[in-house]
Amino acid sequence: MNRRTLARLALVVSVAPSAGCGDSNATSDTDGGSCVAALRGGELVITEYMPDPKGSDADGIEWIEVYNPGSAPVSLVGVGLVYSKADGTDSKGHLIQDSVEIPPGAYMTFGAVTDETRPEYIDYGYGTDLGSMSNTSGMLTVRCGNVVVDEVLYDATRIKDGVSTTLDGQVTPDATANDDLATWCTAPTDGEPYFTTEYGSPRQPNAACPLVAPESCGQCYDGGVLRDAVGPQAGQLVITEVMANAGLTTMTVGEWFELQVTGGEFDLNCLQYGSNTTKFAGDPESAQVLQQPDCFKVGAGDTVLFSQKQWAETDVVMKLTLNDSPSDSNPSPGVFIAYGGQILDELHYPNPKDGIAWSLDPGATTVAGNDDPANFCLAYNPFAEGDLGTPGVPNPVCLKNPCDDGGTVREAVAPVPGDIFITEVHANVSTGIGEPAGEWIEFFTPVSFDLNGLQLGKSAESVSFTFPGGQCSPVGPGLVLLARSGATGDMLAPAGSYSSLQLGNTSGTLWLGVGGTELDHMPYDTPKDGVARQVDPAVIDAFTQSLDPTLNDPAEARCDATVPYAPFNTDLGTPGADNSVCNGPPPTGQCTDPDTQQPRDIDPPQAGELLITEWMANPKLVGDTEGEWFELFADADFDLNGLELGKVWEPYTVGDFVPVAGDCLEVKAGDSVLIARNADAAVNGGLPTPRFVTKLSLGNSNSGLFVGHGGVELDHVAYATTSDGASTQLSLESITPGALDVAVNDDPANLCTAAALYNASDKGSPAAQNVACGGGLVDPCFDADLGAMREKHSPGAGDLVITEFLANPSGTETDREWFEVLANADVDLNNVKALSKFAPTPTELTNAKAFGGTDCIAVAAGTRALLARKTDPAVNGGLPAVDAAFGFSLANSAGAISLAVGDLVLDAVQWATSQGEDIATQLDPDVSNPALNDNTDIAPWCDAVGLGTPKQENPACP
């Protein structure tokens, strides 16, 4: 306890004047008051204080903690709490007058709060009596009358924003011991805060203060006893793993390196480390130094992790960035460790891979062993968020090509010469399927191996793709199909997918290898559009005997494929299946039954068994060549094989056909058969999988479409126009299973424009049942509630009343103007026209544009519709849902609005006076007669409150 003369310690104990703070013995108004407990020095001890709450001190709570070291409760009545500058001046105090006591061995907190605002961690509030504590220095005193019970000085070295200052928890609270600033420290911040983001131990015993680092780096505390640190000897520390470019773990572990202790017991205190040996050679002081008060003891077999972030296995948090590549200042980036200016070990790594550590094989854990790059490999075990490495634990054995086999990492089985024989290449894919998305390659292998590490390219010097590690990808024995990654390639169910490699359409060579060693290559000559190049089965049989991969080199070993393959059934090839015999007989009128896998006669559709029910000639989301399609309804079981497609049926002109040979493309009665220009849903606008991909284009106007078989037309449609982004479909009631009439789609009255979206922009029902869409309706619209087309309900006289408008909004008026109408009957607004005229002429009515649209703009009786310049609430001022948009401006004065259907004016209003900015004009809610609202300048109209009540009932006019 710091002792001062009474003159030096004269204090003002600040309390309300009515309470009276001085006692009868006070010699001046700065003397302390009486203390009921008649405390002597040291009978209470200051153990913790918070002068700097988080953020602004004015917004936080300053507080003091006092401890009772005695064996009996202590009454605090008459005890004074005082804060002053460090020299005792500018003192302010508080006299405790409430009946408060501290139990023996207990801690009590006093804070700058009132009882009404006191949080749980404060026992007693002294309000604002002590003023604001300085964040740099000050003195806190507990008094009993003229007796200084305890007093503590503090300075800026022990003050931290949002963290209390505590007496060392290893020191018994004592009013003399707490005079030494060395026994104080800031509270630890690695635990839970006592309040939001503030740290300390109010009302609780304090944590131990950390040891103060010795003045000499070569000394450390061992069990609290200071001793000389024992340094490592040459060869006792080896750098075993480095993560120079963290990926997924950037924020949790960061870059890191790892040391292995190979022998002896020693301390790491004073260990130097860094990433630039060139700089260290000229300036040893440039290295980072491991300094801490405690002895950092390690022994043989220990693994020590240095990382940028504190992680579960981290031993040292380093302020070091590991370089990715050489520079003028660091020509050979890496990691080094040193002691006393002498390098113990250094490691220089190649270009680091993102998120993958450079790991030393455990059999080479010496300072010489890690000099040989052959002893290193890329780490393969995941840690934390998924980067690869083993930070803080011993390294596993190096694998040159690791893969994960059901949770067990093993060396991938690599093929050797004689294990691969290229059998088929599809380099020139038809437009309907698309390239390179539809490209694929096939090889035969007599053994099993893993694709991991297999290289694809045009030569050993031109490798385009290498199958990566990760999950093991075993294949073989047998035919192996590899396809371009993506939705199109996935439809072939390949054994593996590749990217980057793109096969040329003229001529070229496909090369396969491992580690730059060729396993096979094959020229694929000049491939035809949509036709794969394949090796004759007899040559493949010869390879199985000789394992000679050169057998596919001669041109006579290869030929064009002749069989279409599923699911596209346009291009020719046998991906993943036995090749056709080169120069064999042409396909016959048979197909392969998908159930029995045996050839059978094709069952073609007969007259009356199919009907064209829908066509999309003008898609909006994607281009015509990608997004066109049409749909057939099947009224019987048949095969699509041999179906002929075209646009001109007189004379009968075939534009495309479904190949005859290959798998039987079976259709069942009741199927909606989709035929499209492209099979890739990512390209064609999200279509379901088509049964056939055609090259036949559909005209947007004055065109037609037919389907037939064997030169005989089965159905056709002719059309004059199409809608942008909407298919033309045959109404459901016109499709009569069991009694199809192919003439129904010739009558426009049975057709309509589709209304349901199948993607973000295009409407139709591809490969699905059509709706009853209004075939035969006079003036239809699509009712979303009914899910069907119906007649529009156009309003008549008295059905619509203009009830509110905003003609002068702030900002851009053309974006935020609107008006509201009340419906006196169930109506649709589709045929309604809005004009800026009170009495439009017949010509103006004729030329005005109706709101229109395919969807019904329905307004129920008694509800309001909102008509606005813009529909986007981000632009129109946050209006409710807009029912329709109009295209003229509302005049600020001398303006008008009228609504009409045909030449019938339903309602009209006009105004002469200037409209106030951001003030709507409204009709009194008691009026719903369009004959009574003509003049908005007079009753029953009035100014609305502010921006009005769009699409809501108006309040009564005053």
Image (tube, grey):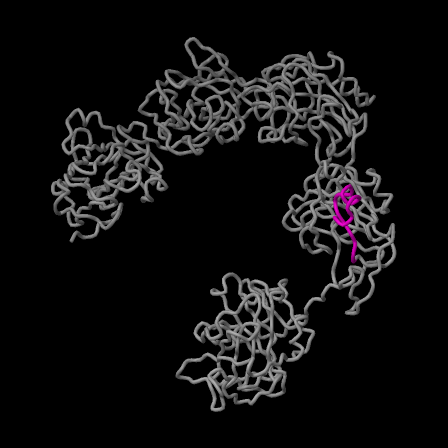
**In the image shown, does 157 or 102 lie closer to the viewer?**
157
Quadrant including the N terminus: bottom right
Q: Which residues are magenta?
A: 269-286
**How many numbered marks appear?**
0
Question: Residue 433, located in which quarter of the rendered image?
Answer: top right
Quick check: can you spot residue 635?
no
Q: Looking at this rendering, what residue extends furthest in the top direction?
A: 651
* Residue 593 x %, y %: 60, 25
Residue 595 vs 742, above or below: the answer is below
In the image, is residue 184 part of the stretch drawn in magenta? no
* Residue 872 x %, y %: 35, 39
In the image, is residue 279 part of the stretch drawn in magenta? yes
**In the image shown, does 234 or 798 lie closer to the viewer?**
234
Residue drawn 56% across and 18% down? Answer: 659
Residue drawn 81% across and 59% down? Answer: 267
Question: Residue 611, located in which quarter of the rendered image?
Answer: top left
* Residue 610 x %, y %: 44, 23
**Horizontal placement of 7 versus 953: left or right?**
right
Quick check: can you spot residue 66?
yes
Q: Looking at this rendering, what residue extends furthest in the front direction?
A: 7
Residue 183 vs 493, above or below: the answer is below
Residue drawn 78% across and 35% down? Answer: 413
Residue 605 vs 319, above or below: the answer is above
**In the image shown, does 87 or 882 lie closer to the viewer?**
87
**Horizontal placement of 3 versus 295: left or right?**
left
Question: Residue 215, located in which quarter of the rendered image?
Answer: bottom right
* Residue 563 x %, y %: 62, 18
**In the image shown, does 926 or 102 lie closer to the viewer?**
102
